[in-house]
Each structure stands twice: as structure tokens, then as C-alpha cells.
């Protein structure tokens, strides 16, 4: 695996871990929805993750990351549809895809 891809994987891991750190013990969608600063911070991390995933995919589309397309789509939605972001979709992505992504990154980067 190239150093460039490893750098992007590191960026993805760091952003995904940041999302989990920002949330801490928050496990309630309504608390997430009521905290604008938290939402914006997480949206920014999705921008980073999605951009890095897109770059990885251009270099080597065979890198196996289960939710690569969904997370890249989340980035596009956050950037291009900032006024139509659905907090429930973001929350679902956090809950369903981030833990799996982190496990896959651990395997890919070892």
C-alpha cells in the first residue's frame, strides 16, 4: 500500500475517531440535534472522511471499505446540500458506519 493511501487512511481514522470523541456518551439523536456546534463539528469530519475516501478510491478503487460509497455520498450531501442536511441520516451514518469503518481501518493499516 502506498504512503499516499496510508496518509489518507490515517486522515479517515483521525476524523472518525474525532466524531466518536465529540459524541462521548451522547447516544440520543435529540441531544445531537439540539447541539448546533456538535452537528457542525461532525459534519466537518464527514467532509474530511469523504474527501479522503474519494482520493483513496481514485488511486486504488480495490481498497476494501464496506461503506466507502455511503460515506463519500455523506460528504457530498454535507458540502453541496448544506441547507438540506438530515440530522437523522447523519446520525444513522454515525451509528451504523463509523464503528465498522474504524475496524476496517485497523485491519487495512496493520
Image (spheres, rainbow, N blue to C red):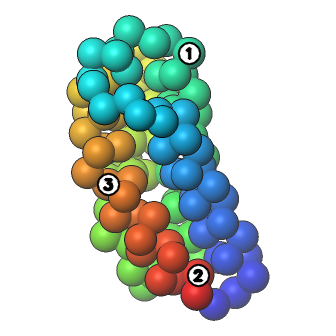
Q: Which residue is mark 2?
A: 109
**In the image, 6: left or right of 17?**
right
Residue at x 37% of width, y 21% of height:
32
Please report whichever mark, 2 or 3, sits nearer to the chain's N-terminal start.
3
Q: State the residue position of label 3.
A: 97
CA–CA distance between discs 3 and 1?
22 Å
Q: Secondary structure at mark 2?
A: helix
Asked if 66 appears above or below 23 in the picture, the reply is: below
The mark nearer the N terminus, 2 or 1, is 1
Q: Within the image, what quadrant is residue 9 found in?
A: bottom right
Q: CA distance from mark 2 to mark 3?
A: 18 Å
Assess disc 3: are there few (<14), some (14-19) or many (≥20) residues with their C-alpha within 10 Å of its C-alpha. Answer: some
Mark 3 and 1 residues: CB-CB less than 8 Å, in contact? Answer: no
The residue drawn where x is 27% and y is 16% is 30
Residue at x 58% of width, y 59% of height: 12
Q: What x and y, as percent, mark residue 103?
A: 41, 71
Q: Label 1, on which residue?
A: 37
* Image height of 55 relative to 77, above or below: below
Q: Is residue 47 left or right of residue 73?
A: right
Task: Provide residue 67's location: percent of width, then percent of height.
Answer: 32, 62
Q: Give x and y (percent) for residue 65.
A: 39, 72
Name the residue at the front extreme: 25
Q: Quadrant of residue 6?
A: bottom right
Above or below: residue 3 compared with residue 56: below
Quote the CA–CA distance across marks 2 and 1.
Answer: 31 Å
Amino acid at each position: 500500500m502506498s504512503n499516499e493511501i496510508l496518509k489518507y487512511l490515517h486522515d479517515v481514522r483521525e476524523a472518525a475517531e474525532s466524531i466518536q470523541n465529540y459524541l462521548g456518551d451522547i447516544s440520543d439523536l435529540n441531544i445531537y440535534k439540539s447541539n448546533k456546534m456538535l452537528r457542525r463539528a461532525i459534519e466537518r469530519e464527514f467532509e474530511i472522511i469523504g474527501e479522503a475516501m474519494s482520493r483513496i478510491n481514485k488511486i486504488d478503487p480495490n481498497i476494501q471499505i464496506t461503506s466507502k460509497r455511503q460515506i463519500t455520498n455523506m460528504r457530498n450531501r454535507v458540502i453541496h446540500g448544506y441547507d438540506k442536511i438530515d440530522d437523522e441520516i447523519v446520525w444513522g451514518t454515525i451509528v451504523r458506519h463509523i464503528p465498522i469503518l474504524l475496524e476496517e481501518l485497523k485491519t487495512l493499516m496493520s
